[in-house]
Amino acid sequence: MASANLITPSIARKTPDVSKEFFHRGGLWVLGQSVLLLAVAALGVVCCGESSDRLFLLGGGLLLATGALTGVMGVASLGRNLTPFPKPNADAQFVQHGIYRLIRHPLYTSVVCASAGWSLVWQSWPALAVSLLLALFFDAKARREERWLRKQFPDYARYEQRVRRFIPWIY
């Protein structure tokens, strides 16, 4: 009866340690951004403004559209290299085409624009404050990710000199 619960050593060695891989690839960064995104979404609805100011609606809508377009272009350019983790897969390709010719981290730009847009549409100042925190978070995450990218791709340092991190020609 006791032997039914035993795992043979050969099976135990082949089973990947998912939690180790999660942390090794930067899973805490993924958890952090998820918490911040949920906070923006919830605060937008719970702490919304009273008026229906068209300027906020227009600005928010433009930011949401910019975020959506940037995100779609980033996903399309990455293709099979897409991962939620900041550390690239071992078999990843160095992507410099599409929107990556203009921005090194278009998916982060996309999320920040969409979060700020969401906050403005709902006229939620607490959500906008968390969106700003999210922008700072993504700046730190991008800096960590770039250290991994420089290790994996020798040409990445030259790419950093040519292409801005989040906003074309500015930052």
Image (cartoon, rainbow, N blue to C red):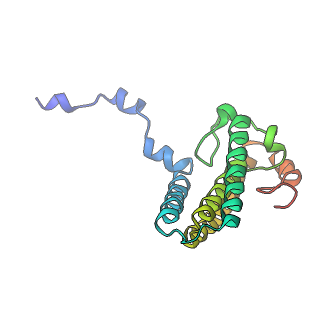
Looking at the picture, how far across and down is residue 124, in whole percent?
56, 69
Residue at x-position 72% and y-position 44%? 69
Looking at the picture, how far across and down is residue 135, in whole percent?
66, 63
Q: Is residue 10 left or right of residue 20?
A: left
Q: Quadrant of residue 9?
A: top left
Looking at the picture, how far across and down is residue 3, in whole percent?
17, 29
Nearer to the camera, 25 or 74: 74
Q: Is residue 77 left or right of residue 12?
A: right
Query: In the rendered picture of this protein, how many numbered marks are placed on residues?
Result: 0
Residue 147 seen anywhere in this rendered image of the structure: no
Residue 1 seen anywhere in this rendered image of the structure: yes
In the picture, the quarter occupied by the N terminus is top left
Q: Is residue 77 left or right of residue 141?
A: right
Q: Quadrant of residue 153?
A: top right
In the picture, the quarter occupied by the C terminus is bottom right
Looking at the picture, how far across and down is residue 30, in whole percent?
54, 52
Nearer to the camera, 104 or 66: 66
